[in-house]
Structure formats: C-alpha cells, structure tokens
Amino acid sequence: MSTRERHDPLEQDDAPGDALTVNRGGFLSRGAAVTGWGYALPPNVVTNADLVARLDTSDEWIVERTGIRERRVGGTTGELAEAAARRAMAQAGLEASDIDLLILATTTPDQAMPATAVGVAHRLGVQAAAFDLNAACSGFAYAMVTAHAMIATGVERALVIGAEVLSRITDQDDRSTVILFGDGAGAVVLEVLPGDDRVLAWDQGCDGSAGHILFCEHGSTVEMQGREVYRRAVRTTLESIQAVLERAKLSPDDIALFVPHGANLRIIEGINQRLGIPMDRTAVLLDKTGNTSAASIPMALAKAAEDGRLAEGDNVLLSGFGAGMTWSSVILRWGR
C-alpha cells in the first residue's frame, strides 16, 4: 500500500471550513490560520546575460526551458530566514515572546549542527522549540503540516520558514544546474484559531527509490537527471493535488490561487493544463528568483498576499515536490 493510501487525515462529514472539526478520536480540534507573511532576497542579481557571458548557453535557451530570467544569490540561510521571519512577525503584529515554535525548512543549513533554526530563534529573541526540517523543495509544505499538527496539540503561534542558499551547493560551471538555482527565504505565522481551521486538507509522502535522480553529497554539488525529474514531478504533483482536493471536498475551480513550487515554468504549465487552473490564478516568482527550493512557495505566497491577490475566504493550494522524491500539498482557507 502506498504512503498516500495509508494516510487517512481527519475525517469529517461537514463541509471544509465548518466551525467544528472532529478528529478520529472524537475530540474537538484546535484549528489554525495564516496571520502573517514575509520574504527576503539577497541583493546580488545574476541575469541570464551574466551566465551567457561565461557559459555555452543563451538567454533564449534558458527562458524556453525554464522560464527563468534572473536569480538572486548571496547571504546565508540563517540571515535570509531571519529577515523573512521578522517581516512575517511584523505583519502579524507579534513580538518574539508571542512565538512558541519555529520550524525552518532548508536543504542548505549554515552548519551541520546546531540547527540553523536555533540561531535564527536566538537572533529574533524567540525562546521556544526550534528545529530544521529537510524535505528538499517540499520542505515548506511539510513544515506547514508539522506546525499545524503541533498547534492542534497545544502550540499557539508558529513561525514556519523556508530558506535556501542553493548557490552554495551549485556547480557554477555546470550550465544544466547553475541556470536553475537561486537563494531566498519566505515565512508565515501560523496561529491557533479555536473552533475553526483554515488548514483544510493536506497530502504528503515520498518515494525513496527516486533519490538518485536529484541529490547532493556532503561537500559536493547538486546532481540532477532533468528529464526524469520533470516526468516524475508532473505525475507526482498531480496525484498529490487530486488527493488533497478530494479530502477538502473541492475542485480546481474552487481554488482562488495555486502556489506551486517554483522549479520550472514548463512543469508548472503542464500541471496547470491538466488541472484546468489558468496561469492568472497561479503565483509564480521563478522568473526573478530561479528555483529556491523550500523558499519558493512561501516567497510566492507572501508576494501574492503583498500584492493584494488574496481575499478573506479564498482557497489557496500549495504544492511542492523535491529530492527524495518528496511531495506535499496543502489547501488553506485565507484569512481568520
């Protein structure tokens, strides 16, 4: 039986978003809502023209195959995570003392130990549980599910961050990967909402047999079988999205904004075409940021919120896939 078939999330007969959600044990659950958001990018911009000047490639080739025109590089994972988190906390109107959980999704921690999240918490002044989570490009959605589960059992307010400095693990002379990856961070505050739950449904899992198609050994750089990643990404993401839509009792037409992992525009367009979700209902930043792994979803979500693309009650679909291969999809109802 697959991971998806084994997983049986909270069962309920009520429509999604009803005030009372009952889990399998019969206990009234504590819901959660996104109340703050923010993102951060390093100042250094690397354009396609910069890469063309030193590699055997062209702007047309890069844009046609990826949709990327520039990417940001620089800083550390901890610095970018801290900046995004500060903006999310300010937007939510919270102080460091209000936060009692910090999860940092990253594949590029600043050191082997302690967790980068610990240093971020210290600099923010947060005295609470803090840890790193590595599920590659699915990491932020994984972290959202984890924070939601911890809120259901007692946490009041969680900082959920995705931050990466992929330029550090990318071979700068490999045109197949250096054109793709960039650095950045995004964060949200997930806050308890008693008697209601704005996290409508989730689906996640992994297929470890595909670990060899996208990986990075300690002290080395990213290696990727691009065509195989593309093939599996489209199929896996569609399956996960279909599963989470069914659990939320929604259809693609009910989704106000789709926030996919920003890996490759062709992948996103392929998924959208199969789902029937138009690109104008999709949040995409990768043309300006490149693939930022665990940071891509929270950055695109924060930018969409900043731009006024989300309204109270909107259904928001987050979906990521990454090395492992991992996948994770979450449907949120926006607002409180």
Image (cartoon, rainbow, N blue to C red):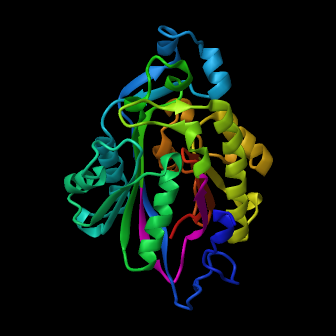
Q: Nearer the viewer, residue 235 or 294?
A: 235
Q: Could you tell me which residue is drawn at 43 percent across and 54 percent down?
A: 37
Span highlighted in magenta in the image = 188-207
Q: Is residue 260 left or right of residue 174?
A: right
- Please provide percent x and percent y for residue 295: 46, 45
Q: Does 10 appear in magenta?
A: no
Q: Could you tell me which residue is drawn at 68 percent across and 43 percent down?
A: 232
Q: Could you tell me which residue is drawn at 68 percent across and 23 percent down?
A: 64
- Please provide percent x and percent y for residue 265: 65, 34
Q: Quadrant of residue 231?
A: top right
Q: Does 202 appear in magenta?
A: yes
Q: Nearer the viewer, residue 205 or 191?
A: 205
| Secondary structure predominantly adopted by residues drawn in magenta | strand
Using the rendered image of the protein, determine whether residue 62 is visible from the camera's viewpoint. yes
Q: Quadrant of residue 192?
A: bottom left
Total marks in image: 0
- Please provide percent x and percent y for residue 90: 33, 56
Q: Nearer the viewer, residue 172 or 307?
A: 172
Instruction: For the N terminus, give its image quadrant.
Output: bottom right
Using the rendered image of the protein, determine whether residue 285 is visible from the camera's viewpoint. no
208 over 41 or under it: above or below: below
Q: Could you tell me which residue is drawn at 59 percent across and 15 percent down?
A: 59
Q: Nearer the viewer, residue 328 or 255?
A: 328
Q: Residue lying furthest bottom in this view?
A: 26
